[in-house]
Image: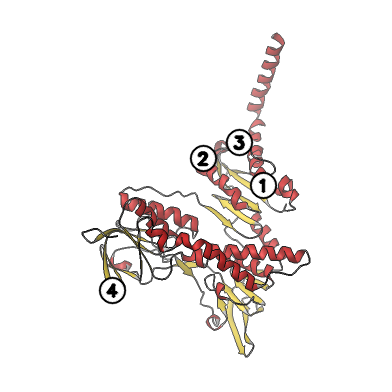
Amino acid sequence: MERKDGIIDLLVIGGGTAGIVGAKTAARLGADTVLVESARTGGDCLWTGCVPSKTLLSAAGSSAARRSLGGSGTAFAEVRARISEAIAAIEPDDSPASMEAVGASVVTGTVRFTAPGEAAVDGKTIRFRQALIATGSVPMVPPIPGLDEAPMVTSETVWDLVELPHRLVVIGGGPIACELGQAFARLGSTVVMLVRSEVLPKEDRDAAAIVRASLQEDCVEIVEGVEVDRVSTSHDDGGSLSTIHTSDSRAFDADVILVAAGRKARTEGLGLVHVGVECDDAGHVVVDAGMRTSNPRIWAAGDVTPHPDFTHLAGVYASTAASNAVLGVHRSVSTIVPRVTFTSPEVAAVGPSTADGKDQTTSTIQHAHTDRAITEEQTSGFTRLVIGKGGRILGGTIVGPRAGESLAELTLAVHQKLTTRNLAGVTHPYPTYNDALWNAAIADARTALDSPLVRTAMTGLVKFNRWRNRRS
């Protein structure tokens, strides 16, 4: 839709989660909105990220369970079909029709800013009052000698595999590397993970240790603290065989190499210099607390910014950016960011994962003492709260089945600045994994009763009530 003066209210660049949510938000607020996408709407989440990867994990888990009972695993063709079905079921929610239904226009093309308030879409000029950059990110491929000649895939291209790799080497140790490495191992691949530092370096070390042990139980070989020096590849009629040489003079053979070594912002060709939009040293578009760039008429959200690369964050922040842009307000985004690594077991966390300083403590419940975990024989996890002054819940980590589901309550507690006494005072259903969260709060709240002052006060109340009862 375009106004009579030929100037649209909001130009959205990119049709992934951030772009879709931003466009729908602006259109629902009554703004003339145009979204431009160079390929297909839905972005990484639908086509190469959340949807296919979580479907793969589910299929791999089912395959491993069947093999543990003496049956056969899931054929890779069945897994591919299941992924296609999941994408097809969700695709309508991200389609151009879904955006047009709320009043946004969708155009296929490539955008380049040409001047303040102007952009070219495949040679055609679009004039805009505000713009939202939501171009996302792409996998980084490190400059390893020989890697470009090897049978290499990333988190975007791994879905093009038509056969299950016999030998898979994963370069990386973050969430994507762990999730995909475990999934392929459970489907039957021989998997080696080459990790520069350590597995899940940004998470609670106790949580990372549990994930490491689980990966090893699934026969994933983990080599930490190594660099990949070079890759050599030989080709014959039977295909290709690569050998990955590491900094500790070891060599690992692979039919396929999965590179999961981070991502970089997709800003190439946008012409940001023509509109004064600044980027940081890593190439991300710099934004303020309201998602505004250095150009007051241009906003950004999603993986193209320095914020964490989470789909849920992209959507929430894009909604804020679009609202600010078309309403002329300046709301700030929340800095409370929940995160989940969907391995088995899952690792879910929000805020700090460990106590930092004398004013913070932790309260941990091992799932070996959680009845639901005991009944399901899934006791290797734990729930840990990080607690500040006055019992305020600052964050925490949950490790276990469906930990991401339990994290929602913990995230709300952090957002609402609740205390362990607040959480302990809410009745929780039994038996659930959330018992651990509740009991962690109860354990901390009880520590207040152990202080000399409180114990003295409680003893006094008991004596007073005993005296009153005798007189009645």
Q: Residues within 10 Å of mark 4 (few under 14, many from 20)?
A: few
Q: CA distance from mark 4 to mark 3?
A: 60 Å
Q: Is residue 69 left or right of residue 54?
A: right
The residue depicted at 75 percent of the width and 66 percent of the height is: 67
Q: How many marks?
A: 4
229 up-or-down from 392: above or below? below
Q: Which residue is mark 1?
A: 433
Q: Secondary structure at mark 4?
A: loop
Which numbered disc flags the more N-terminal residue, 2 or 4? 4
The residue depicted at 78 percent of the width and 63 percent of the height is: 69
Three-letter amino acid code at disc 3?
A: Val
Please state which of the two labelled residues, at mark 4 or mark 1, is closer to the viewer. 4
Q: Which residue is mark 2?
A: 417
Please state which of the two labelled residues, at mark 2 or mark 4, is closer to the viewer. 4
The residue depicted at 56 percent of the width and 36 percent of the height is: 390
Residue at the farthest bottom position: 237
Three-letter amino acid code at disc 2?
A: Lys
Which numbered disc flags the more N-terminal residue, 4 or 3? 4
Whether label 4 touches label 1, CB < 8 Å? no
- Quarter of the rendering containing residue 317: bottom left
Q: Is residue 406 left or right of residue 431?
A: left
Q: CA distance from mark 2 to mark 3?
A: 15 Å
Three-letter amino acid code at disc 1?
A: Tyr
Counting from the top left corner in percent of width and height, residue 165 is at: 64, 76
- Quarter of the rendering containing residue 37: bottom left
